[in-house]
Image: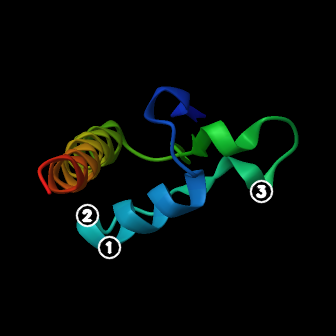
Amino acid sequence: MVDISSLNVDAQELTEFIRKKTGLILIAGDKFDGNGKQFLRMNIATSTDLIEDALRRLQRAIVLFKRKDDDLMNLILNK
């Protein structure tokens, strides 16, 4: 499970964004019990090379997602 609580975002929204931007398919944690809205699930039953690629894609997507939010906030504050 990947903890996304510090991003303060809906897990389902983030998984859709990640899929569209990188092709990486993760599962929103709310599909499971508990506080799943703050987590993403990644299946890592594969080779190390593919896991490393997936983590790079995830990192790139998080940077893009945060930048999108920052750009939106700047638009709101600068109006």
Q: Please say if 24 is above or below 77.
A: below
Q: Secondary structure at mark 3?
A: helix
Q: What residue does disc 1 label?
A: 20
**Discs 2, 1 touching: Cβ within 8 Å:** yes
What is the CA distance from the residue labelled 3 to the residue labelled 2?
22 Å
Residue 55's quadrant in the figure?
A: top left
Q: What residue does disc 3 label?
A: 31
**Discs 3, 2 touching: Cβ within 8 Å:** no
The amino acid type of the residue labelled 2 equals Thr
Residue closest to the eye, 5 or 33: 5
What is the CA distance from the residue labelled 1 to the residue labelled 3?
20 Å
Q: Residue furthest left?
A: 78
Q: Position of residue 70 (x, y in %)?
A: 21, 44
Q: Residue furthest right?
A: 33
Residue drawn at 86 percent across, 36 percent down: 34
Seen in the image, is 25 located left or right of residue 52?
A: right
The amino acid type of the residue labelled 3 equals Lys
Residue drawn at 51 percent across, 56 percent down: 26
Q: Position of residue 18 (x, y in %)?
A: 36, 60
The amino acid type of the residue labelled 1 equals Lys
**Discs 1, 3 touching: Cβ within 8 Å:** no
Seen in the image, is 65 located left or right of residue 19?
A: left
The dot on residue 12 is none
Q: What residue does disc 2 label?
A: 22
Residue closest to the eye, 51 or 42: 42
Q: Position of residue 20 (x, y in %)?
A: 32, 73
Q: Secondary structure at mark 1?
A: helix
